Amino acid sequence: MTAHPPVADCLVSIEGVSFGYDDSPVLLDIDLAVHASDFVGVVGPSGSGKTSLLRLLLGTVRPQRGAVTRRPGVAVAYVPQLETVNWNFPVTVAECVLMARTERRLPWSSRQERTEVTRMLDRLGIGGLAQRHIRELSGGQQQRMFIARALLRRPQLLLMDEPTTGVDVASRHDMLHLLGELNDDGMAILLTTHDLNGVAAHLPRLVALQGTVIAAGPPHEVITPAVLERTFGAPMEVLEHLGMPVVLDRYHNGSRAPS
Amino acid sequence: MEALLDPFAYAFFVKGVIVATLAGGLCGLIGVYITLRGMSYIGHGLSHAIFGGFAASSIISLNYYIGAGVWGLASALAINRVTRSRRIGADAAIGVITTASFALGVALLTAFGNKGPSFDAALFGSIIGVSAGDVWALAGISAFTGGVIFFHYRALLFATFDPDVADVSGVRVARTDALLMLILSLSILATLTVIGVTLVAATLVIPAVVARMLTNRFSRMLWLSSAIGAVCGFVGMNLSYHLDVPSGTTIVLTGAFVFLVVLTVTGGRRLQRTARLDGHGEAAPAPAAVVADDAACTAARGDRNPVRP
């Protein structure tokens, strides 16, 4: 890992952690720290342990070895993968966002809560959709709705599972810009993704994961042919465009070249 | 008209109507959570499991509500625990735990005889089996259930919609699930005498499914499902008297009729809402061609990349 800010800034750290399900190891000897104002992307193929890493950070699973330390009182919010959600569930956008206010006992929302939800949805560019059913939103809007729900908890650390999966190109672009703005406001963000080029363009720090940390640091240190081959198990070309690493699939012998 | 009011001259019928209406509303209310959790089969299974407790408490002369209640709650918690662990599916967990309990109940009643309601009454429901105590027990359980849902509205909603996120957002999901299983067990216990073991599941599922076809809002679905359940209970119990068939069957058939009417009126398209569909029909991740756009973004936002020290 690259040099970290002072330890006092550390929101959550993972030291020497190994984790697995039953006898199947998923993560081995992981060291990772997320500091206030960090904006980190964890890249790796399916099954590389990205979601398990998120679960460790969230504290919903315990490591088999090592320690996960969370700064006392730190507020963490989580945005799930869109694919894991039952979009037929009968809730409107406003009802979904208000779920975050778990401390309120009464079923109906207060005037203050309604104002907050309206303000939050406006800020995220989905104002006016509060009374829509969640299935009526596009993928990008659904992602923003979950971010609104997470932000309503005023988190210091936002963890996101594959936020760029299942959204169109423009939405992905807007999403990463939005996260950049939230990060600029002081919120630490850690997200997992397969989208190498998207995170290389927008995120200052990447972690390549394949059961263990293959590489960590700024994009130009992580997005390299050697690291990507070790991480994804396939050869990839890395070009440089406007000072940014750009990943392309490498054509195998015998495969058809583009015309 | 007079013929319709005739049965209300009998105290046993009035008690039966009260219990059927309350039971319908109660099951309709809880059914919303059960169907949305994809656990529709649990009502069927749990009623069978409670039958085992009913038989055991009858043999050892223990109060039906205590014996069968503890048995049912233990079964519900076991099912919920197995289901949440995701090692086996909810249907398999329910299939194993509850059918074994039902089989045990049948074996015990066959071996030691029955001191409570008849076999038929337990299986298909009966108006005659309703006592004043049953009415009060159901009223108490309805009030308790209403209170639990009122004061745990958001926790129950969040834990039903997305338990993983709820768990990290301050909801004690395990406790909330246990609470839901408790009110479900109590409700099945209290309605079993009127609806019957084999049919109680329908009173949990049908009103909720009909309500889901009528609305996209959770809060509206709750009261719609309760109202549909209560109306079906009331109408079904009246039909039971006039047609001289077990009350459970008429209540369920009334619900099925309402389902068909709503399906016909709203069109089959609304039926989609009742399915658990996980996809959302969005575009695929960005192709390589968009890297040019990302590059332009990087150039414009030179502050983000390369990394800060």
Image (spheres, coloured by chain):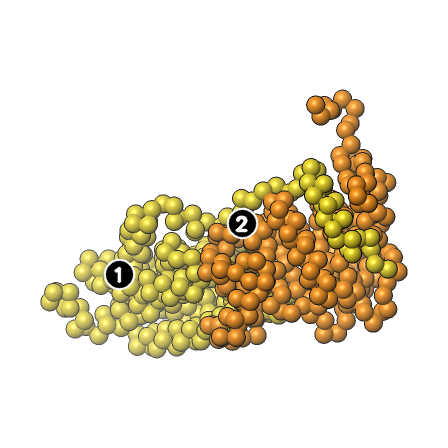
Quarter of the figure with the N terminus of chain A:
bottom right
Q: Identify the residue at image location x=50%, y=70%.
A: A114
**A88 shown above or below B66:** above
- The residue wearing badge 2 is A138
Between B192 and B221, which is closer to the camera in this rendering? Answer: B221
Q: Identify the residue at image location x=86%, y=48%.
A: A221
Locate residue B268, reporting x and y percent: 36, 45
The label number, if any, that marks residue B236 in the structure image: 1
Estimate the spatial distance between the alpha carbons at disc 2 and disc 1, rounded to whole Å.
Answer: 43 Å
In the rendering, what colour is chain A?
orange
What is the chain letter for disc 2? A
Between B292 and B113, which is closer to the camera in this rendering? Answer: B292
Q: Quadrant of residue A53?
A: bottom right
The residue tagged with tag 2: helix, strand or loop?
A: loop
Note whether residue B118 is visible.
no
The residue tagged with tag 1: helix, strand or loop?
A: helix
Identity, as a three-letter code, of the amino acid under mark 1: Gly
In the rendering, what colour is chain B?
yellow
**A76 shown above or below A18:** below
